Image (cartoon, rainbow, N blue to C red):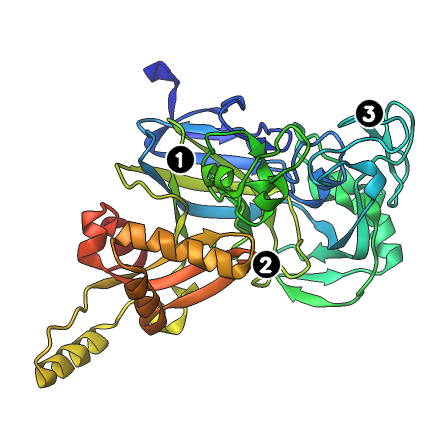
Amino acid sequence: MAQQDIHRELHVDQYTLGLVGPDQEWAGTVADGGTIETYTPPGCWGPMVTPEFHGGHEVTRPIRVAGAEVGDAIALHIRDIEVTSMATSTGSMAEREDAFGDDPFVDHRCPECGTKWPDSIVEGTGEDAIKCAECGANASSFGFEYGYTVAFDDDGTVGITLDEDAAHELAEDAAEVMDIPANSKQHPILLYEPGEMPGTLGRLRPFIGNVGTTPPVTMPDSHNAGDFGQFLIGADHDYGVDSEADLEARTDGHMDIPQVREGATLICPVKVDGGGVYVGDLHANQGDGELSLHTTDVSGTVRMDVEVIDDLEIDGPVLLPPEEDLPFISKPYSDEEREAGRDLGAEHDVDVETDMGPIQVVGSGATVNDATQNAFDRAGKLLEMSEGEVRSRCTFTGGVQIGRLPGVVQLDMLAPMDILEDRGMDHLVREQYGL
């Protein structure tokens, strides 16, 4: 791409129809050290109930980062997240088995006329509002097993769940209330007007559920992870794969880790030239584990700076969350703690390793145990440590946190800075934590 097409700042408001991969249309090219600003529609429920979608999210078109080549990594410094929706609906899901083939997130079909990924229209509100444009049948693959509607305060600090009457009122103006972007193809989930659990107050803290780099094969955006990716194995649709080994192409953009928020740095693998950074699936809040499999999907803007890290060769993301989000034993050492450690080392005639920094290696797999093993493998490769050393350091200076059930985790560790320096990423850790 010509030099004049490389932008210092790039605004993106174009989206894919539920897919990530090298054949998606590029949104443009941003300079190494430049800034990406995205305006994204909600993930999960809106695309899930819109039968045109080939995946469960609506993410941005991929963005090239100038100079990023396969084998490098791209650090995403998340500077700002702003929620623009005023309300959303969510809950646990019920599948409508006659409206899909192998996978309700992917291979949609009209239950009446059989059209695959049918165009759809909206008539009224409620769970039968989304109709096949061809025959008029209810064409959505999902309804709520237990659903609720949440309205947010003007400051975006708290939300409350609404009763049926208030949910219906918002459903009458669903697209505007949810601020569905003009280029979005999804139907707003507020149309479903669920009203269970009314009057519950919750704290809000927005984060990005699906963000990262493009895999070298095309896959549904919601399945770019080791747990959701399991649904692709043996599937009889356009994106099915033969075995677990085929999922190694994933880049684990779909993490649903609440700490991927404003102030975090996310280091992502480059598996196609240019990286193909994409953003989607903003959430207003979520508890660890995303226990109902879905949370408060919202529209919003994200602003982040990008930085190419040459030859890092990671297989999945490495997260540097805001310091306040780190577990107690994984926080950077204070000067007093370092001094106490050196004194104790002198007493026992041991050289004490005090120059260490926090990292979180993201792992994913069919189960939490599989995801943790994946994180062990990735951490061992990154740090050139045996699994025994990784397990020991994580036990003594870290731990494991659950991003999403059934299988996304963060493996916490205080890593020696000399090893991080050898890998070319020590400056990221020092800048993130003021070391």
In the current view of this chain or complex, which residue is farthest to the bottom? Answer: 347
Q: Give the secondary structure at mark 1.
A: strand
Disc number lying in front (1 or 3): 3
Badge 2 amino acid: Leu
Badge 1 amino acid: Thr
Q: In which image quadrant can residue 396 be found? A: bottom left
Q: Which mark is residue 405?
A: 2
Q: Give the secondary structure at mark 3.
A: loop
Q: CA distance from mark 3 to mark 2?
A: 33 Å
In the current view of this chain or complex, which residue is farthest to the top? Answer: 2
Q: Is there any visible trace of residue 72 in the rendered image?
A: yes
Question: Which of the image's four quarters has the C terminus?
Answer: bottom left
- The front one of 114 and 320 is 114
Mark 1 touching mark 3, by CB under 8 A? no
Residue visible at 23% across and 53% down? Answer: 420
- The front one of 171 and 97 is 97
Q: In which image quadrant can residue 230 be found? A: top right
Residue visible at 28% across and 41% down? Answer: 312
Question: Residue 370: x, y in percent?
Answer: 49, 57
Reading the image, the residue beneath label 1 is 35
